[in-house]
Image: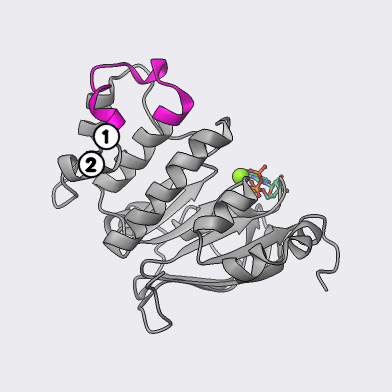
Amino acid sequence: MTVTETSTVALEIEGLTTGYGGVPAVRDLNAVVREGEILALLGPNGAGKTTTLLACVGALAPMQGSITALGKPIDKRIERNARRGVTLVPDNRGVFHRLTVSDNLRLARRKGGSDLDATLDHFPKLRSLMNRRCGLLSGGEQQMLALAKALLTDPKVLLIDEMSLGLAPIAVQDLLPTVRSIADQRGMAVVLVEQHIDLALSIADNATVLHHGRVALSGSAADLRNNRESVEAAYFGLPTG
Ligand SMILES: Nc1ncnc2c1ncn2[C@@H]1O[C@H](COP(=O)(O)OP(=O)(O)OP(=O)(O)O)[C@@H](O)[C@H]1O
Ligand SMILES: [Mg+2]
């Protein structure tokens, strides 16, 4: 990995507490993601991963603490953050099932965004599926499309929620290295929520494990890879030693 400590901070979460109807679902979270870095956000169901991503795009306001993206605080107006390059790939993939791949991509294009050809270079398989309705794609192909749509907006901070939901590990094995190379090439900061722990740790720079809305473990992906027992313990909310 070529990223150094001197790279520019793209996303900074400081003392974030946020949740629903005044009830915190994430408490006192701190995280920094630099340009070109991938942070894996891990943890069991209900740990607060999606909640964190929603706060990062401005869909949930902080109850305490702050989130800064690209040098500015996250705005309450989601579209403003999106225009500045803070993009969420939701866990339902956000593709239109009745439309073709081509139409989905056309809808995602925007002035000043990335070139379609360059984007499709990352997902060559999509080129042969352009006229197919999305509802007829495999889960992995739909996920490629969801990522391609997000990339067309030229994101600087990309938040990916459970890309692998419903996918075979083999499909994830193909997709995650693509995310890694896009982050490297574009200097894009990525927060990757992922259930496949080992795959996520194999491509991430850093990782944070949430449990019941709190950080149970955090460190470099390399350290966590070498200390899988601590990761398991953090999942169960046990002391990580
Ligand atoms: N709209 C909501 N209203 C109230 N509580 C919610 C809402 N969405 C999530 N929660 C609660 O917030 C907590 C964190 O949920 P969150 O969706 O962030 O978890 P997660 O880590 O993404 O889990 P999963 O792996 O199942 O997607 C859970 O206790 C959940 O029940
Ligand atoms: Mg979730």
Give me the residue at 40% from left, 79% from top.
4
State the image coordinates of residue 63 (x, y, percent, origin top left). 61, 66
Read off the residue under disc 2.
121
Name the disc covering residue 234, or none: none
Check disc 2: other Cα within 10 Å, few if <14, some if 14-19, many if 20+: few
- In this view, the residue farthest toward the right is 238
The C terminus lies in which quarter of the figure? Answer: bottom right
Tell me which amino acid carries mark 2.
Answer: Asp
Give me the residue at 48% from left, 60% from top.
56
Query: Residue 184 colored magenta?
Result: no
Note whether residue 219 is visible.
Answer: yes
Give me the residue at 18% from left, 45% from top.
118
Read off the residue under disc 1.
124
Report which quarter residue 225 is drawn in: bottom right
Check disc 1: other Cα within 10 Å, few if <14, some if 14-19, many if 20+: few
Color scheme of the displayed model: one colour
Give me the residue at 43% from left, 42% from top.
175
Report which quarter residue 10 is drawn in: bottom left
Tell me which amino acid carries mark 1.
Answer: Pro
State the image coordinates of residue 136 (x, y, percent, origin top left). 40, 15
Seen from the viewer's position, the closer of residues 225 and 69 is: 225
Range drawn in magenta: 124-141
| SS under mark 2 | helix
- In this rendering, the answer to whether 240 lies above or below 144 is below
Left or right of residue 49, residue 45 in this image: right
Seen from the viewer's position, the closer of residues 83 and 171 is: 171
